[in-house]
Amino acid sequence: MHVTILVLYLLFMVGIGLWFSRSKVMSTGDDYVFAGRDLPRPVMIGTLLATWVGSGTIIGGASFAYKYGPLASIFFLAGTPVGIVVLYVVAKRVRRHSTYTVPELLEQRYGLAVRVIAAAITLLPIPASPPISSPVAATFSASSRRCPHRAEPSWWPSW
C-alpha cells in the first residue's frame, strides 16, 4: 500500500513538472539555475530557506527541543524570520551581480583571495556530512520501527 502511494505521488510530481515545463524554454545556465533570474523576491527567499533547512535541522531541532524544553527551541525557530529579513535585503543585490555562488559574489567585492578562502570554508563541512547524517537517519529509522531488541553501540547518543 505504501509503495503504491509513493509511486502515485512521484508520478503526480513528474506530471506537474511536465505540465509547467511545456511553455518554458531553457537556453542559458541562468534559466536552469535561477529560473532565468525572474523569480519574485518572496519565491526566491522561500527556495533559499528551503535549501538551508534540511532534515538534519528538522530532526535535530525537534530532538533539541525535546531534550532542553520548548523555550530552547526558539534558537532554531529564530533562523527563519531572521533569514527572511536578511534575504529580503540581500536578494536584489545578489540578482544584480549575476553570480552563481557566494564565493563568486565575494570575489567581485574583495578579490580572488577572499573567493578562495570562502570556497574552502564552504567545502569544510562536506566530509563531516555522511557521519553526521547517518546516525540521524539510523535513529529515525530505528525509532519508527520500535524494535525492542536492537543493540546500540556504546558511542550512540542517548536521546
Image: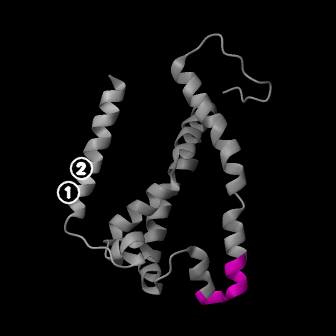
Query: Which quadrant is the N terminus positioned in?
Result: top left
Q: In terms of secondary structure, where does tag 2 sit?
A: helix
Residue sitting nearer the eye, 142 or 84: 142
Q: Main secondary structure of the magenta part?
A: helix
Instruction: Establish if 107 lies above or below 91.
Output: below
Q: Is 66 placed left or right of 156 in the picture?
A: left
- Which amino acid type is shown beneath numbered disc 2? Gly
The x and y percentages for residue 144 are: 51, 23
Report x, y in % for residue 24.
Answer: 24, 70
Q: In the rendered view, does 67 fall on the left or right side of 124?
A: left
**Residue pictured at 70% horizontal, 82% vertical:** 114
Quarter-wise, where is residue 59 in the image?
top right
Q: Which residues are magenta?
A: 108-116
Q: Is residue 38 above or below residue 140?
A: below
Q: Position of residue 51 (x, y in %)?
A: 48, 57
Residue ID for mark 2: 15
Q: Residue at x 56, y 41 (%)?
A: 61
- The disc placed on residue 19 is 1
Q: Position of residue 128 (x, y in %)?
A: 71, 50
Residue 130 visible, this angle: yes
**58 is higher (above) or lower (below) than 138:** below
Q: Which mark is residue 67?
A: none
Q: In terms of depth relative to the viewer, which is nearer, 56 or 83?
A: 56
Q: Residues within 10 Å of mark 1 (few under 14, many from 20)?
A: few
Q: Report helix, strand or loop for mark 1.
A: helix
Q: Are marks 2 and 1 in contact (CB under 8 Å)?
A: yes
Residue at screen point 24% across, 52% down: 16
Q: Amino acid at mark 1?
A: Trp
| Location of residue 147 by image quarter | top right
Task: Please check the rendered image and state whether residue 113 is part of the magenta-colored stretch, yes or no.
Answer: yes
Q: Look at the image and say whether residue 52 sits in the magenta stretch.
A: no
Q: Residue at x 60, y 88 (%)?
A: 109
